Image: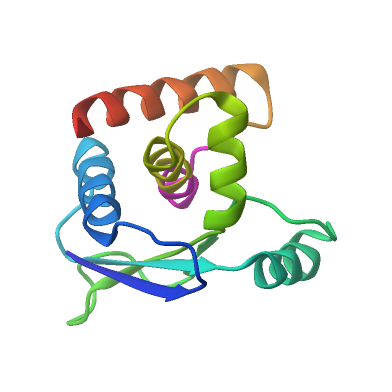
Amino acid sequence: MEILINNNQDVLVDDELLLKVARTALAYEHVEDDVELSIALVDEDEIRGLNAHYRGKDSVTDVLSFETEEEEPGTSEYPHLLGDVVICPSAAARQAEEYGQTFEQEMALLLTHGILHLLGYDHQDDTEAKIMEGHEKEILADEK
């Protein structure tokens, strides 16, 4: 399992926490070891641009997920590219304060949420949202 972190912003983030959370989420979801996950930490201008370009929403958001369109795991000599999770730590810091939790808790939640999107989870309706939120809670409880 390869987890790459690309930090292009100024907020101090604990890379080890992100690695631990990512490994926990992937193990919880029984993802094979031959995957590669990319985590990008970006500033508000960059995430706003991505949100506008890919989702048509010209606003800052906290996390975006981009699935990689490629062949099935195990059919190549290279790791299966799971996709990219893009997080805006400055948005996470504001939300952590708003929701009464630590910055680390908010970053862990956002990363878990993004990974679950890469694995096909969604929250378009109440049933899907409850399933996704349940997985998030279980993963974050296991991560502690």
Relative depth, front residue between 52 and 33: 52
Q: Position of residue 74 (x, y in %)?
A: 20, 67
Please state, as top left, top right, bottom left or bottom right, where the N terminus lies in the image: bottom left
Tell me if residue 37 comes above or below residue 19 in the rendering. Answer: below
**Location of residue 17 in the rendering, given as x and y in whole percent from the top left corner:** 25, 50
Q: Quadrant of residue 78?
A: bottom left
- 5 relative to 108, above or below: below
Q: Is residue 61 magenta?
A: no
Q: Is residue 108 left or right of residue 142?
A: right
Q: Is residue 64 visible?
A: no
Q: Is residue 53 above or below residue 116?
A: below
User: Height in image: 99 above or below 84?
Assistant: above
Q: Is residue 14 left or right of residue 43?
A: left
Q: Residue at x 42, y 34 (%)?
A: 102
Q: Which residues are magenta?
A: 114-122
Quarter of the image holding residue 14?
bottom left
- Residue 88 makes an appearance in the image: yes
Percent across and percent down for residue 56 are 84, 61
Q: Residue at x 52, y 24 (%)?
A: 100
Q: Nearer the viewer, residue 59 or 99?
A: 99
Q: Quadrant of the C terminus?
A: top left
In front here: 129 or 91? 91
